[in-house]
Image (cartoon, rainbow, N blue to C red):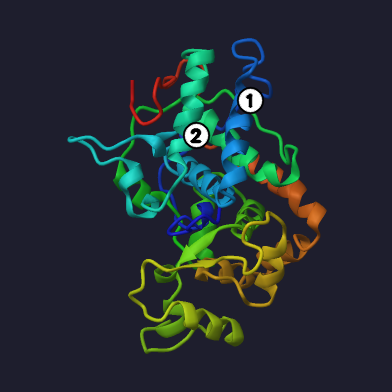
């Protein structure tokens, strides 16, 4: 999920505490819109690819958006809702302040409403845009997507704060954050691989450089050479504007390189380094060093994440405009 990790750690960064609601995607299926809106998936891909072609940072942003949406109330597009005078929505919660790509989602929705009014949910658009943005690099879909989500009608900033995994999490809190969403240890490690693209803000890891235990010290688990490089970019604990690549030199290429740098103790966030503090997680990291294994497993794990707490059938709604509840 890298796009400005901020608190996302792609679903690796903050524990979403909201219950999954007992619905785990049983009604999602491939080709859901085959009859009701046969052009739907192609429309999403065309518009997404058009924008990624001119803005290669979008894949990280859409992955992060997908993670942050699914970890709060399930994958219901609640992250897209605008705040009102009476409600501060998820979008304006601290972990989501640096999310981006909303304009592309709106463009897709506008086209779909013209082609097939009231048919395609914003939740499915997020799911497709995440997959399609990453797939642009390969000129083909790199994982399968099941559809049929409906949109939620509640969005609260407080729930984002309570549910999104933090980059400061240790292994225990990270694992619990994922378990709360019915995701496994395997899913945690594999989905962390999304940090192979995108950037992180200095203030979410600079404590590892300057004040790890509150005594002006550095994190001893961070590669010292890498730490010295990071210090030239993040010069103080208070810097909350500078961003750094999560996968140095490869932050626009979706691959398994994240796991290579992780083994070299160059994971940017404390939550990255945490994966090496547990034998089971560390063994999975080693498995992900094989590229084909990573791509296969990532496709499976993001499918599981995309089924968290989904609304299907007559639940929820199909929003006419993604930022506004009908």
Secondary-structure class at tag 2: loop
At 62% from the left and 53% from the top, the residue drawn is 191
Q: Is residue 46 visible?
A: yes
User: Going 72% across and 59% down the picture, which residue do you hit?
Assistant: 256
Residue occupied by mark 1: 41
- Front residue (pair 158, 63): 63
Q: Which mark is residue 309?
A: 2
Image-based side of 131 in relation to 103, left or right: right
Q: Quadrant of residue 253?
A: bottom right
Residue at position x 63%, y 57% in the image? 252
Q: Tell me the residue at 52%/62% (across/down).
A: 199
Return the x and y of residue 2 as percentages of the image width and height.
Answer: 55, 56
Taking 204 as reference, is 178 above or below it? above
Looking at the rendering, which quadrant does residue 250 occupy? bottom right
Tag nearer the camera, 2 or 1: 1
* Residue farthest to the front, as pictured: 54
Placement of 253 over or under 150, stated as above or below: below
The answer to whether 60 appears left or right of 293 in the picture is left
Q: Looking at the image, is 212 positioned above or below residue 147?
A: below
Figure quadrant of residue 41: top right
- Quadrant showing the C terminus: top left
Q: Is residue 38 above or below residue 51?
A: above
Does any portion of residue 306 appear in the rendered image?
Answer: no
Looking at the rendered structure, which numbered label has been put on residue 99? none
Q: CA distance from mark 2 to mark 1?
A: 22 Å
Q: Check disc 1: other Cα within 10 Å, few if <14, some if 14-19, many if 20+.
A: many
Q: How many marks?
A: 2
110, 277: nearer the viewer: 110
């Amino acid at each position: 999920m890298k796009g400005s990790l901020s608190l996302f750690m792609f679903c690796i960064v903050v524990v979403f505490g909201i219950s999954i609601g007992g619905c785990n995607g049983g009604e999602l299926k491939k080709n859901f819109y085959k009859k009701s809106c046969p052009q739907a998936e192609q429309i999403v891909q065309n518009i997404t690819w058009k924008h990624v072609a001119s803005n290669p940072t979008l894949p990280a942003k859409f992955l992060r958006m997908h993670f942050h949406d699914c970890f709060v109330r399930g994958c219901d597009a609640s992250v897209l809702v605008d705040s009102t005078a009476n409600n501060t929505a998820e979008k304006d919660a601290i972990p989501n302040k640096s999310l981006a790509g909303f304009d592309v989602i709106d463009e897709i929705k506008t086209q779909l409403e013209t082609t097939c009014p009231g048919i395609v949910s914003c939740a499915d658009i997020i799911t497709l845009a995440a997959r399609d943005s990453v797939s642009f690099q390969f000129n083909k879909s790199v994982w399968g997507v099941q559809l049929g989500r409906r949109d939620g009608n509640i969005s609260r900033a407080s729930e984002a704060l309570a549910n999104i995994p933090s980059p400061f999490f240790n292994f225990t809190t990270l694992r619990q954050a994922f378990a709360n969403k019915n995701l496994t240890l395997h899913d945690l490690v594999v989905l962390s691989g999304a940090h192979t693209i995108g950037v992180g803000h200095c203030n979410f890891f600079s404590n590892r450089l300057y004040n790890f235990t509150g005594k002006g010290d550095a994190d001893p688990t961070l590669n010292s050479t890498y730490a010295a490089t990071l210090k030239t970019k993040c010069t103080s604990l208070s810097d909350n504007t500078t961003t750094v690549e999560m996968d140095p030199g490869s932050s626009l290429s979706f691959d398994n390189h994240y796991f290579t740098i992780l083994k070299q103790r160059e994971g940017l966030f404390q939550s990255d380094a945490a994966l090496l503090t547990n034998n089971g997680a560390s063994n999975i990291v080693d498995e992900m060093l094989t590229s084909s294994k990573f791509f296969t497993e990532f496709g499976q794990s993001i499918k599981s994440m995309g089924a968290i707490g989904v609304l299907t059938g007559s639940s929820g709604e199909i929003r006419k405009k993604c930022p506004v509840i009908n």
